[in-house]
Image (cartoon, grey):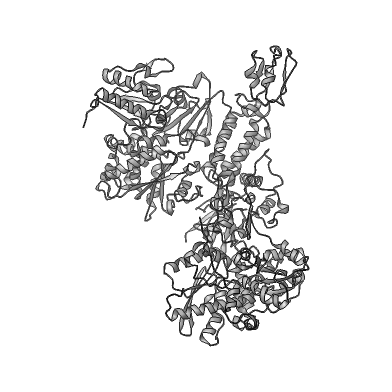
Amino acid sequence: MAQYKMHLLVCGGTGCRASQSEEIIKNLNTEIKNLGLENDAQVVTTGCFGFCEKGPIVKIVPDNTFYTQVKPEDCEEIVREHILKGRKVTRLLYEDPETHKHVEDSKHMGFYQKQLRIALRNCGFIDPENIDEYIARDGYAAIAKIFESMTPQQAIDEIKKSGLRGRGGGGFPTGLKWEIASKNSADQKYVVCNADEGDPGAFMDRSILEGDPHSVIEAMAICGYCIGATKGLVYIRAEYPLAIKRLQTAIKQAREYGLLGNDIMDSGFDFDIELKYGAGAFVCGEETSLIHSMEGLRGEPTVKPPFPAEKGYKGKPTNVNNVETFANVPVIYLKGADWYNKIGTEKSKGTKVFALAGKINNVGLIEVPMGITLREVIFEIGGGIKNGKKFKAVQTGGPSGGCLTEKHLDTPIDFDNLIASGSMMGSGGMIVMDEDDCMVSMAKFYLEFTVEESCGKCAPCRIGNKRLHEILEKICAGKGTEDDLEYLENLSKVIKDTSLCGLGQTSPNPVLSTLENFYDEYLSHVKERRCIAGSCKALKLYTIISDKCTGCTACTRACPVGAITGEKRQPHVIDADKCIRCGACYDKCKFTAIHVQ
Amino acid sequence: MEKINLTIDNINVEVDKGTTIYKAAKKAGIDIPVLCYLNLEHLNIENRPGGCRICVVEVEGRKNLAPSCSTECTQGMVVKTHTLRVLNARKTVLELILSDHPAACLTCSSSGQCDLQDLSQKMGIREIHAVENAKVSTYRKDASPALNRDMDKCIMCRRCETICNDVQTVGALSGINRGFMSVVAPAFEQDLEDSPCTFCGQCVAVCPTGALTPFDDTNRVIRALADPKKTVIVQTAPAVRAALGEEFGMEPGTLVTGKMVAALRTLGFDKVFDTDFAADLTIMEEGTELLGRLTKFLAGDKDVKLPILTSCCPAWVNFFEHNYTDMLDVPSTARSPQQMFGAIAKTYFADMMKVKREDLVVVSVMPCLAKKYECERDEFKVDGNPDVDYSISTRELARLIKAANINFKALPDEDYDNPMGESTGAGVIFGVTGGVIEAAVRTAYELHTGKKLQKIDFEELRGLEGIRMATIDFDGIPINIGIAHQLGNARKLLDGIRSGMYNFHAIEIMACPGGCIGGAGQPLHHGDSNIIRARFDAIYREDAGKPIRKSHENPYIVKLYEEFLGHPMSEKAHHLLHTHYFEKHKI
């Protein structure tokens, strides 16, 4: 086996691949070959590094040099300078936005300093298509340890002791879930991995499956051993082709190594995994809907109880966990529940992966210990707000979460605090908004998503969300009334109170949290017909400053609806009723005589 | 059984484990409003998708409201069914449902028997919170010869789906589309006529609104009655007389045969006949066919297919044409009584009356919606002229009677006209599950053995269990008989035959629960098993009261064969009274 001096880790995640990382890998290999460095340096295609803002990423180990936004044509220089001569290519290093200095290695980058990577431990480090690399990182050692020294109940107890809670959104204690499934006796039980990641902007599950599929496979087998299930199913959306491919490769390799199949590691325990593809419905992330979809039925929820642990896939006891939850499991056994439960807050242990998006400098995927504050996440890891704008709010928990504001910035993030603040953990989406974002429009945007994704089974979600959306549209169009605000609140509360599944029970959150935190903004929409952020088109008022207007008639000619009138060389006027707020006059005027309010 | 104690509105209730809050409340005398929920007691099945959220209640310690129809009681549970929070939620949700429902009650065919309308009244909805430019979900209309679908009125209660899939196993209806645009429809948005739908109409019988309604033939009947050039005759199916009275406030199970005849005469029908006459004729043909096949079978003829299956039920015919295409030669080729009546009426009777075929209009009153489809089948037409022109349901007849200002309850009892009004008790019991085969046995036994039956009542063939089996002694030869009602049970029986599990000589199948007495054209019974039972008893009462109770002893049937048909299974009979089946392709 070759002993390489250096490894060039290239991100092979979906994002970086879209920015030509495959080309980069090819070029790096060609250059290494050209220079005869095949025995010294190895190029490894890894999973996501998380710093997607600056992709494609090439990281050199052991010195942890972190090259960002690498282009295929940079490869020659990287190999010649760095690998051959040991000189870093400074221009490709990450530049600190504050000091404007290049950061020599990833350990000193603000983005990584506060992170603690457990679920993402292997992402960006190993080749996900090579089982040996996973094994080299203690892969499958957890299950071996369990087979050797633990009964299923002891293994469940370890997870209970760790305090691990479901990372899919609900935060249900994982150990307890396993225990319930283990106690229901049946001739067949199932372990299901929920890889139906549906929150817009969230991609932690995809990244884990693309970057470290074996950790999920190992955890599912452990879960199977604990609850007495011999069959595992991964419900994955068909629009994750790379994750599917890597998972398929990993399953194949695990079977070849005897880590899946009959009598795993001579333990007498049989376990195998099958993939089930989802068509991309948000509601199928809800476990009963997911199970129905897997059964070939319409993807819609049913009333719980019965819970899947009693009556799940094909009517058999089924344990459903999310990808990220599973990715935590092997580490807990390797390092111990006591190690794990020291991380995080009192009721939320361990770490959480967040997908940072929106008006933030460092868009990407991060993993942080529970209890970290929003301020640390947004301003330290996330590098603050884009273009020096002012922070306004952050939406956590995806489309059914809520907006948190300045006053929540120092709240430690965990399951319970987020709920107490009117939002939720969800699967870990975090969308940052700045002063230019209208909060009514934001609520409208999220409702548009939930209206689209409602399955239609229960009336409050099917019709209520549609009505919420219509009222928000009305407010944004400048036609809202104060009565509408009252009805919005009542309707939102009723939808939450009466909906069948988690989708409807949370979909009004963006409305309720913006009503609570940004009521003034709603009021100014309905009372003054004004959008403070200036983003609601219908509420813009275009007027002509007569002192500045020269009567050149340029605006009259630009106006597509004939809303501007006036004599030549005399100040013109805009008829607000006719004006469609297209901004053509504003763009055309050479004398800044058009005023937008 | 473990007992659960809980309090509902401060009343202590003890229930069996597994009981829902809704049922526990009912036990305590508290009536929680429901909309999508339907207890189909006669089928032992509940539709409780938990979709409408009208039945929500407050449960202490639970963060959101609980749907009482589908939440099981737990020990020590404290339930409140009418707090302000609950009432506000219920009303808001109902307003939402109404906001996406056409406000066309005045012209809706379900007005007056609409659960949504009733609930709105009960909850005192006087206005719907108006959202400016609120959209209503729309879907194209779908009309078939038997029933209409107007999905704009669908409230996604899923009752039709439960009936179609879980009870009838037809699988024609399921939820499609997402969110606001979701409706119940056949797969790939087909029209019902292109789907595996059998037109049994059970979905119509449970629809809480006007989303699924019967095709209305009453206007065409009125027009025919008003046409002086036409001779209009009517036939009434056996099950109609046992249920029609319910539409006029009479007790379920009241037999109204005589009043019905009087009403039809008052409506202007030139002759009022009885489908039971044709039922007797069916027995002659089907019984002879059975005996023929049986004799050959017992003689060792390998080409003979047994069991013979009855073919009177049009929904059942549709069902096997869709699902058992490999067994199309098994059912009896005998047409249904409705169609035998039509064929004889437009030949024998038309000649007798010296009326031209095209000037004779045959109307049938049926407990059934599939009969509307059946009479439109091409094989039952001569040069485009159907043997039976219009088929109206029991409910449609009630409407005609009401429209004609007839005081039904005050009518005298009148008798059917002859020749096609005379029938036996065997013809009457065609209206219940087990009746057709009992009628066949009464005749086949006597024709086969040449002996008189000692006992006419075959109790072993009667009952309301979904699948029944019995062996009848044909003078030393044991004849195995299977009976199923509801298409789901039919499927079980058929699958058993296909796999060789069962060994029957003859099988009777009816598509609707209870047989024709539970047909989709009957007054709505909302799953009340007492109503079904009352109709069931009424039919056997009518049978017991008949002077002649065996089809082959009907003097007019004997005369019909003498004067016109020759003998059962004759060439003429074959031409007029038998049919063949088609393979219907599913996608």
Q: Residue furthest bottom?
A: B451
Q: Is residue B376 above or below residue B575?
A: above
- In front here: B1 or B490? B490
- In front here: B507 or A198? B507
Residue A107 visible from this viewpoint: no
- In front here: B125 or B342? B342
Image position, residue B497 (x, y; %):
45, 69
- In front here: B573 or B183? B573
Q: Quadrant of the N terminus of chain A?
A: top left
**Exactly how many numbered labels are in the figure?**
0
Q: Residue furthest left?
A: A1
Image position, residue A289 (x, y; %):
48, 47
Give the residue displayed 35% in from the left and 16% down from the top: A90
Image position, residue B146 (x, y; %):
63, 60
Q: Is residue B375 above or below residue A157?
A: below
For residue B30, side relative to residue A237 (left or right): right
Image position, residue B149 (x, y; %):
63, 54
Q: Quadrant of the C terminus of chain A?
A: top right
Give the residue displayed 58% in from the left and 56% down from the top: B192
For residue A498, side relative to residue A166 (left or right): right
In which quarter of the view is residue B413 placed? bottom right
Residue B333 visible from this viewpoint: yes
